[in-house]
Amino acid sequence: MKSAVQIAADVRSGASSAAAELERSLSRIAELNESLNVFLHVDAEGARAAAAAIDERIARGEDVGALAGVPIAIKDNLCQTGIPTTCSSRILEGWRPPYSATVVERILGAGAVVVGKTNLDEFAMGSSTENSAFGPTRNPLDPSRVPGGSSGGSAAAVASDMTSISLGSDTGGSIRQPAALCGLVGVKPTYGLVSRYGLIAFASSLDQVGPFSRSVTDAALLLEVLAGHDARDSTSLPEPAPSLLAHVNDGVAGMRIGLVRELYDGADESVVTAVHAAAAALRAAGADVVDVSIPELGLTLSAYYLIAPAEASSNLARFDGVRYGLRVDADDVTTMMEATRTKGFGAEVKRRIMLGTYALSAGYYDAYYGQALKVRTLTIDAFARAYGRVDALLGATTPGVAFKFGEKTADPMAMYLNDVFTIPTNLAGDPALSVPFTTGEGGLPIGVQLLGPGRSEARLFAAARVLEIADGRA
Amino acid sequence: MSSAISRDEVAKVARLARLTLSESELELFTEQLGQILEHARDMNTLDLTDVVATAHPFGVTNVVRDDVIVASLDRDVVLAMAPDAREHRFAVPRILGEAP
């Protein structure tokens, strides 16, 4: 398996070409996509044209960018001009966006070659890809198990070496959880670091786009390309993109790291063991690791499952059969909208729309949505207090290794509990990443999570790199 | 403990959200939404009276751009995505009832 850093270096030096790297990617997809259901759309023709253009530019001596000729997969809730974009929903089946997401423009501008759009839980609502209208994605490490979700397709693309890197989105853990379950690095950046323009909205105050990769260095490379102000996203942070790649090998000497009880309590024994082993590895590399308790985190799951559905119920009101996507004809407009939404949305999306509509409705707003926003304040304050004492926090990413298909689909609450360790960061707007560390049941990967205050990505990459080396991955 | 949400409330919410539920869906969703809302009651164990609500993580203020005309999406491109468009407009079925 070749890293994105290596591919870009080889393409720039002439040791390889964008076309050759693309063909390797397309042949992996041809070999595995039917059994794993990773891609909803493969744009072989467009990708071949893009790769040829990059090779021509390199032949002319041009610098084509940091991702020169690197094939990349993107989650199918990100718009790319003229390419089918479905959010894994029947309601958008066949729709082709008239513009590209800022992140898509940035990776193309850095010389990457987009090979296609990956499967997800419908509208990014889920933790297993079982909520996709186009069938679940299988975990490449054990096809009887889920790859996690909602960005399960983007995780599986990298885990099966169809591509070296991919884009996902993380609203409550949708990058970090599949990264953990597929043995990858996955990053949820600081809210506002990466533009949301062209990301089809799920919960706008929580959504962030971020990278998947097999190595910490590749994640830093890709995030450096994605990050930076975008005038088209009003929540975009104003400052220029931070330098990340240069700090990957900074180490953790003198770094104060808090091991958070609430971020591993209740996890499977193998996961708890992995988290403690990670703490020991960081300590051995010179970090000052201390035990921390943040009791407020116990309430974040409840707050999240009111806030995110409330925002979703508002965001998904736009799918009404008028301007794009599915329309089910009827004699009057209200019946048309109701028939369209009833046919177009799957069960989990309906569940969350109704939950959010209820939490926002007169008479229940204060008891549910209002209360959740106050818990959000407590969460932000509690994290801020912790970051007054330590530089970063350490915990588990998920309560266990990849689970089997159907194991949690009958009980929404059981599925939601899989997000219990990843949700708090989204509420706070802070960055967090998952990095593989040791293995559990059946040799399946375990992810440990590193969290930091806003804009601390460079520090998290440095700590993750220490764990990657300690785990014998680099 | 009473269920956090009744069948009638679920039916009302579905109407507000423009969703049609079958009898069996109504039953299932009532039970599942009840469980989720039940779990949310753990937030009531705290006295949050004096806590200020946060709707956005970094308390950003609204951003406006300069009031100058810039290119937007082409009208014909946008209308071409619509299920039905006529005379440069989105077309929908009847929106008003018959006169009484």
Image (spheres, helix red, strand yellow):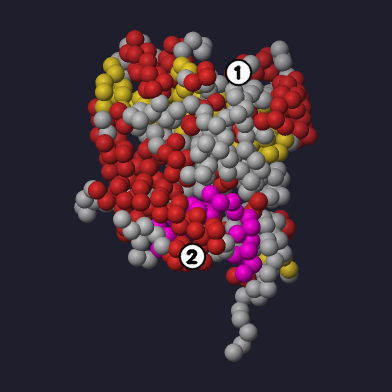
For the residue marked with disc 2, what is the amino acid? Ala
Describe residue A100's horizontal placement relative to residue A185 as left or right. right
Marks 2/1 same chain? no
Residue at mark 1: A3
Q: Which residues are magenta?
A: A335-361
Quick one: which residue is furthest to the bottom in this view? B100
Provide the chain ID for the residue under circle 1: A
**Looking at the image, is mark 2 or mark 1 nearer the viewer?**
2
Provide the chain ID for the residue under circle 2: B
What mark, if any, has residue B11 been given in the picture?
A: 2
Q: Quadrant of residue A70?
A: top right
Look at the picture and state if A329 lies above or below A72: below
| Residue at 36% across, 48% down | B39
Is residue A347 in view from this perspective? yes
Indicate whether residue A412 is drawn in magenta: no
Look at the picture and state if A66 lies above or below A210: above
Indicate whether residue A351 is drawn in magenta: yes
Q: CA distance from mark 2 to mark 1?
A: 52 Å
Q: Position of residue A239 (x, y in %)?
A: 43, 36
Query: Mark 1: few, some, or many residues within 10 Å (few <14, many ≥20)?
Result: some
Q: Main secondary structure of the magenta part?
A: helix
For the residue marked with disc 1, what is the amino acid? Ser
Q: Position of residue A168 (x, y in %)?
A: 55, 35
| Residue at 60% across, 59% down | A341
